[in-house]
Amino acid sequence: MIRIGLVDLDTSHPAFFTNLLHRSPDMRVTAIYDGGAVQSSEYIAQFAREHGIPQICSSLDELVAQVDGGMVLSQNWDLHLERARPFLLAGKPVFIDKPMVGRLSDLNALLVLAKQTGTPVMGGSTMRFAAELGALRDKVTDLGGVVSAFASGPGDLLNFGAHVVEMITAFFGAHITTVSHIGGNPSHLFRLDQLDGPPIILQLGGGQNGPGNGCVLVLTTQRSVEVIHPQGAWQMTDATLQALSRFFREGIAPLSLAASLQAIQICLAAAQSRHHGVAVALSDIHPNAGFDGAAYTHDYAKLGAWQHDGLSARSHYIKS
């Protein structure tokens, strides 16, 4: 049996992933560690009872020693690097929930640490496993290819923005080079330029996340206009489970860590472009660029947002 440990039960995602993993014949969540940023000790104990998880650990090191792999699910993305570090040093594969990180410095440090340890890392939004994306990719080939694209998603620039941006990179690949803020308020429009491909217009902050207002991808092909509206993580269970199973069994992630992290680079470049009013190349993101994970998590906990999937706190961009 492959023993999985959960780190931080801040959001609705731990229940989703636990139920998903327990559908597997040989993977079980066997231990929990929670840092107390959002949930109470009573909530943690109840979660363990409801999901049949035998161990609640008093430290992250204790958890790492008891499992074969981990899932870092903290709402505060500023904790993700340090939460993942002991797994990487122990050579145990770790999944990092979206957004994998929120600062360029953490992104670069995670890449270095993963390379140094050689430990597999998987993470990001499950949006990339939407069946609609694969079906659309097959279809547009027969329609002469993509001429232009528009993508939209609700919520803030990073926490929910990561979903729509990862939808884009899942379809087109990790080939975005430059982000330019076009304008808008309260939602914002950006132009994404690719190394080799059509321009993409991205709308972020398009209303509140919820039924009927999820991510949308619109493609103009040589002969048609195609629209998909992926139904969210809860409808992607089979593909997500397949990817997690291969990751924890074989240490093989669906894509490279660098490719996974491009969605974060795009969000950082978008915020920087919006703030300064200039196009920002992904290679020129300011070293101090980031979103304040602690501030977001404070608002998230105050709102009780884990109980309301459509509720979004406000992104706090660290001006650079």
Image (tube, helix red, strand yellow):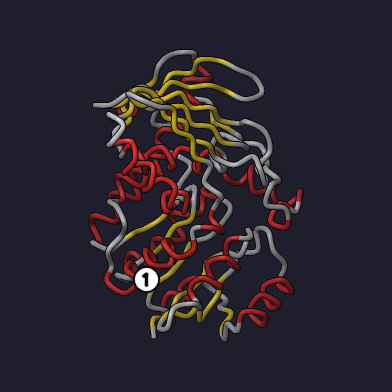
Indicate the quadrant where residue 157 lies: top right
Q: How many marks?
A: 1
| Along the viewing direction, whichever of 179 and 319 lies nearer the viewer | 179
Image height of 294 relative to 149, above or below? below
**Left or right of 99: which side holds 112?**
left
**Residue at the (38%, 23%) spot, across then down:** 148
**Left or right of 86: which side holds 6?**
right
**Left or right of 156: which side holds 306?**
right
**Residue at the (39%, 35%) spot, across then down:** 265
Quadrant including the N terminus: bottom left
**Residue at the (54%, 27%) spot, across then down:** 203
**Residue at the (69%, 47%) spot, across then down:** 310
Image height of 35 relative to 231, above or below? below
- Residue 64 pos. (x, y %): 43, 74
- Residue 320 pos. (x, y %): 48, 25
- Residue 5 pos. (x, y %): 48, 74
- Residue 231 pos. (x, y %): 56, 49
Q: According to the image, label 1 marks what residue?
A: 245
Image height of 111 relative to 213, above or below? below
Q: Amino acid at mark 1?
A: Ser
Residue 9 visible in the picture? yes
Residue 284 visible in the picture? no
Image height of 316 relative to 242, above or below? above
**Left or right of 35: which side holds 85?**
left
Please tell me how crowded label 1 is: few (under 14), some (14-19), or many (20+) other residues with Cα within 10 Å.
some
Q: Secondary structure at mark 1?
A: helix
